[in-house]
Image (spheres, helix red, strand yellow):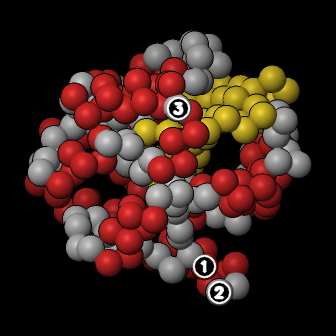
């Protein structure tokens, strides 16, 4: 699939998602309002990943592929000067709505992650969730490094493909939210190689090793289940097990 077709498919796919969500929010506008914990604890990796950004007060932060805009709102509440973008015009509209509903100011625009409309050295930090695995990582990495200031940090939460059982489930088992575009794929270590010319440090932390089993009987959010606590101990003592995790947090420093 050539780049233009891939990008058009991604835009169309996510515009359809955003349109379904927009219908819901037309009827339930109060659902746009949320507290920080509702976002930070909705998956086990979000709060630890946010901590990788450090203190964002007074810093210029880019929400990279902002989607519904919840991360943008949390960053703004923490004192960051937030710019957000998404390929989907529908998600851009939702992010703007969410910012207004939560009384924060963010700058949101439609853009392609592989051709960013921002000036060189614009941001101290970049946040992204489930975005890198949609992209050409050489082109995206070059643009990401261009807009990130010296000493800056970029943090991404991404699905991981190191566990064959997880890959089997993704390919063959039905579950909510399974629909994907043709261009997206969970990442492996070698998939990050195109980023290495642009970043001196690429740190990978694994999440949901045993904790992924919780998805078989519950979709309830929260970081404190017994399985997740076991994961923390196992991954601290045996860090190589991160490759078998369902998700990873990738921290880039240039």
State the residue at coordinates (23%, 73%).
Answer: 174
Relative to residue 32, is residue 21 depicted above or below? below
Q: Which quarter of the figure has residue 84? A: top right
Q: Quadrant of the C terminus?
A: top right
Where disc 2 sits, the SS reads loop
Numbered label tally: 3
Q: CA distance from mark 2 to mark 3?
A: 39 Å
Residue at horizontal 22 percent and vertical 28 percent from the top:
226
Q: Nearer the viewer, residue 152 or 47?
A: 47
Q: Residue at x 53, y 57 (%)?
A: 162
Give 192 or 115, whichever is nearer the viewer. Answer: 192
Is 120 displayed left or right of 37 in the figure?
right
The mark found on residue 238 in the picture is 3
250 in relation to 246, above or below? above
* Residue 126 picture quarter: top right
Specify which label sits upstream in the sequence, 2 or 3: 2
For mark 1, what is the residue? Answer: 6
Element type where label 3 sits in the image: loop
Q: Is residue 176 above or below residue 203?
A: below
Vertical relation: 116 (above or below) 12: above
Marks 1 and 2 in Cβ contact (< 8 Å): yes
Disc 3 to disc 1: CB gap under 8 Å: no
The numbered mark, 3 or 1, whose residue comes first in the sequence reads 1
- Of residues 110 and 62, the one nearer the viewer is 62
Closer to the chain start, of discs 1 and 2, is 2
Alpha carbon distance from label 3 to label 1: 38 Å
Is any atom of residue 50 visible in this view?
no
**Circle number at residue 1:** 2
Quadrant of the snapshot with the N terminus: bottom right
Q: Position of residue 10 (x, y in %)?
A: 51, 72
Residue 127 percent location from the top left of the image: 57, 37
């Amino acid at each position: 699939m050539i780049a233009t077709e891939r990008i058009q498919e991604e835009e169309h796919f996510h515009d359809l998602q955003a349109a379904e969500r927009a219908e819901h929010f037309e009827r339930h506008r109060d659902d746009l309002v949320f507290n920080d914990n509702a976002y930070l604890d909705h998956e086990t990796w979000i709060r630890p990943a946010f901590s990788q950004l450090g203190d964002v007060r007074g810093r210029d932060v880019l929400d990279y592929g902002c989607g519904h805009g919840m991360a943008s709102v949390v960053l703004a509440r923490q004192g960051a000067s937030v710019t957000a973008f998404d390929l989907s015009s529908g998600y851009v509209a939702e992010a703007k709505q969410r910012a207004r509903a939560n009384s924060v100011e963010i700058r949101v625009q439609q853009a392609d992650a592989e051709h960013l409309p921002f000036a060189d050295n614009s941001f101290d930090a970049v946040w992204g969730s489930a975005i890198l695995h949609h992209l050409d990582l050489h082109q995206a990495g070059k643009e990401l490094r261009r807009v990130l200031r010296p000493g800056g940090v970029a943090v991404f939460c991404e699905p991981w493909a190191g566990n064959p059982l997880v890959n089997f489930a993704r390919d063959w088992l039905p579950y909510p939210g399974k629909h994907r575009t043709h261009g997206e794929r969970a990442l492996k270590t070698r998939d990050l190689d195109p980023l290495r010319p642009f970043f001196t440090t690429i740190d990978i932390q694994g999440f949901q090793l045993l904790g992924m089993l919780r998805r078989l009987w519950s979709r309830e959010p929260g970081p404190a289940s017994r399985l997740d606590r076991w994961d923390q101990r196992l991954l601290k003592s045996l860090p190589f097990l991160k490759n078998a995790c369902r998700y990873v947090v990738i921290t880039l420093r240039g």
